[in-house]
Image (tube, helix red, strand yellow):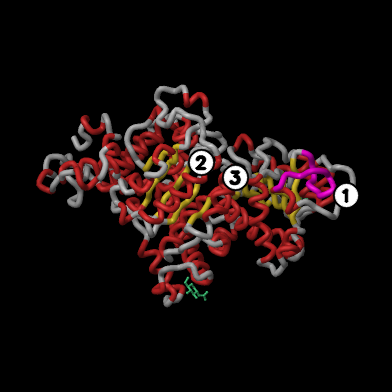
Amino acid sequence: MFDPPSFSSSPLSAFAIPPFPVLLSSFFFIVMTIILTPYWSKGVQRLKPASPPPEKLRHGLVPSAFNEGVHAERALAQLRGKDQPLEKYIFLSRLKSDDPDLFYKLCLENMAEITPIIYTPTVGDACIKFSHIYRRPEGLWVSIKDKGNIKNVLNNWPRIDEARISVVTDGSRILGLGDLGVNGMGISIGKLSLYVAGAGILPQSTIPICLDLGTNNQAFLEDPFYLGLRQKRVSEQEMDEFMDEFMHEMTQAFPKMMIQFEDFSTDKAFRYLERYRRQYPVFNDDIQGTGAVVLSGLMNAAKLSSAASGMPLNAHRILFFGAGSAGVGVATQLQSFFTLQGLSVEEARRRIWLIDSQGLVYESRGRLAEHKKYFARNDYSGPPMTDILDIIDYVKPTALLGLSTISGAFTPEVLQLMAAINPRPIIFPLSNPVRLSECSFNDAVVNTNGTVLFASGSPFPEQEFVGRVLYPGQGNNMYIFPGLGLGAILSRATQVTDSMVEASSLGLANSLTEEEHAAGLLYPRVERIREISAHIAVQVIRAAQKANVTHSPELAKMDDSQLHALVKRKMWNPSF
Ligand SMILES: *[C@@H]1O[C@H](CO)[C@@H](O)[C@H](O)[C@H]1NC(C)=O
Ligand SMILES: *[C@@H]1O[C@H](CO)[C@@H](O)[C@H](O)[C@H]1NC(C)=O
C-alpha cells in the first residue's frame, strides 16, 4: 500500500518531471521521496513514528506479537532460504529500500556473509543482469544527452543539501566483466552500501551515479530491456568535455561532496584521476584504494618476514608478476613502503621489479609500453629473461605479488623456490576473482611448509596445517575506502592527497589487536570494520590538516582522543 502500483509501475516518471519542487504537492512529494530515496521510510512492519504514514495508522498494521529482535532473525532466515546469490541480492536490495535500519543491522552483524552478496562477487552478476532485475530508481543517471544541461539533472536530486559522497562509474570496466554500460549502476549502489555499513556514512548523504556515455557491449545494445542509450561509446574528446562539465556542476550542486570514481576502464581511470585530483575532492578506489590496502598488508607481512630473517625492512625486494596498469599502479604506491623506511623515492624504485608477458621488464629489452618504463631495470642487459623461476633466482625477492589474472601462475615450484630463499616468503596473489588467482591459499601453505605470509584479492578459506589453523589475508579495499571517505567528508577536504591515502594505509596496518597479531593476521578482522574505519578516519583527517586541504578548523583544535570520539559520534548506526 505504500508503493502504489501507479507509481511503482513507472517510477522513472519521477525523473521526467522537471523542476522538482515547483510541480509537486506535498502528497506527491512524500510518495516520490519514498520511491526515490526510500531510506526515509522505515519498515512497513514497524512503522516508526518518524515515517509515513502517521502514527494513528499504526494500530492494527503491526501484528500483535511483532517483536523487532525476532523480526531480524526472520529476515535473516528469509535471506538464507534463498539458494541463488542473485535472489539474495534482490532480496537485500528490496530490504534496503523497505527497511534500511534492518538492512544495515544485518550487514553489520553478518559482514562476512552479506558483503559478498551486496558487493563482489555477486554484484558482478547483478550488474550483468541489472536491466533485467531493475525495479526502482536508486541513484542518478546522467547521460551524454544531458551535456550542456548537467546542472539541471543534478539539481533534481531530492536531498541535495545532505549529499556528501557519491560513487560515479561510466560502466566501462565493471569488475573483471568489461563494458557493462549503465548496468554499472549496481556497482555505485553496492559500493555506497559498504560506505554506510563500513563507516557509518549517513545513508541519505550518498548518491550512486551512473554516467551513460554509450556502451560497446553489443549484446546490451540489442537487449530490449537494456536501460541505457542505444549507442556506442563517445569519443575521448566528447567524454572529456562531458566530464569537465560534470565535475564542475557536481561541486556547484553539492559543495560538500567527495566523489569516488569506480570501474572506469583503466586508461580513463588514470586519465580522470590525474585530471581532477588537484581541483576536486576525488578518489579512485581501483587505483588508490587497491594500492593502499596492499601497502598495508605488505607492511605487516614485511615485519613478520624480517623478524624471521633478520633482514632490515628497507632491504625487502618486491617482484610483481603482471605489469598492466593495475600492477604498475600498485607498484607505484608500494614505493611508500620504502620511503617510510627512510629511503629516497629513487632508492624505493630500485627495490621493485616487474614481470610482464615477455618476462623481466628492463630497459634494453626493446620498446616498452609507457607505463612500464618507470620501473624498467637498467641493471640487467642480458638476453630476455622469461622464466619466472630464473627471474626469482636472479632477483631473490622477499615478496612476490601477482596482478596478472593468470590462474595458477604461482606453481608449486615457484612457491617452493620462494620458500627456499626466504624463511617467511610473502606471497600475494592479488588477481580477482578466485578462479583467476595466481595460486590458492592451500597451494601456498602446502608448498612453503606453512611459512607463507599470504594475502589475496579474493577470499580463501582458512587452512589447517600440521595441527595449526592458518588464516589467509584478504587485501579487500573494503578496509580502506569507508574510513578514507569518512575522514575526507568530516575534514571537508578539498582534495584527497597522496598523503591522505598513505595515512589510510598506515592506519589500517596499525589497527590490529593483540589477538589478531597473535593469530598471525596481516589484516584485522573485517567484523571490526567500524572501529577500523574510525581509526583510519582520524589518521586521514590529520593528514588532510597537514596538507592544508581541510575546511574544518574546529577539528584542528582537537587532540587525537577528542577527534576519535567525534568521528565515532558522527557515524550513523541503524536504529533497530
Ligand atoms: C616444516 O616445518 C616444520 C615446523 O613447522 C619443521 O619441523 C620441518 O622440518 C619443516 N620441513 C621442511 C621440509 O622444511
Ligand atoms: C593553507 O591554505 C590557505 C588557503 O588555501 C592559505 O591561505 C594558507 O596560506 C595555507 N597555509 C599553509 C601553511 O600552506
Residue 254 place in picture, x, y as percent: 37, 55
Chain-order first, disc 3 or disc 1: 1
Q: Horizontal placement of 560 versus 93: left or right?
A: right
Observer able to see residue 427: yes
Q: Determine if the magenta segment contains residue 366.
A: yes
Q: Determine if the magenta segment contains residue 78.
A: no
Q: Which mark is residue 381?
A: 1
The magenta segment: 358-370
Q: Looking at this rendering, what residue extends furthest in the right direction?
A: 382
Q: Horizontal placement of 333 versus 209: left or right?
A: right
Q: Looking at this rendering, what residue extends furthest in the left direction?
A: 56
Which of pointers 2 and 3 indicates the residue nearer the eye? 2
Q: Nearer the viewer, residue 141 or 69?
A: 141
Q: Nearer the viewer, residue 96 or 79?
A: 96
Which of pointers 3 and 1 indicates the residue nearer the eye? 1
Chain-order first, disc 2 or disc 1: 2
Circle 3 residue? 457
Q: Which mark is residue 238?
A: 2
The kind of residue on which mark 3 rests is Gly
Q: Horizontal placement of 190 versus 378: left or right?
A: left
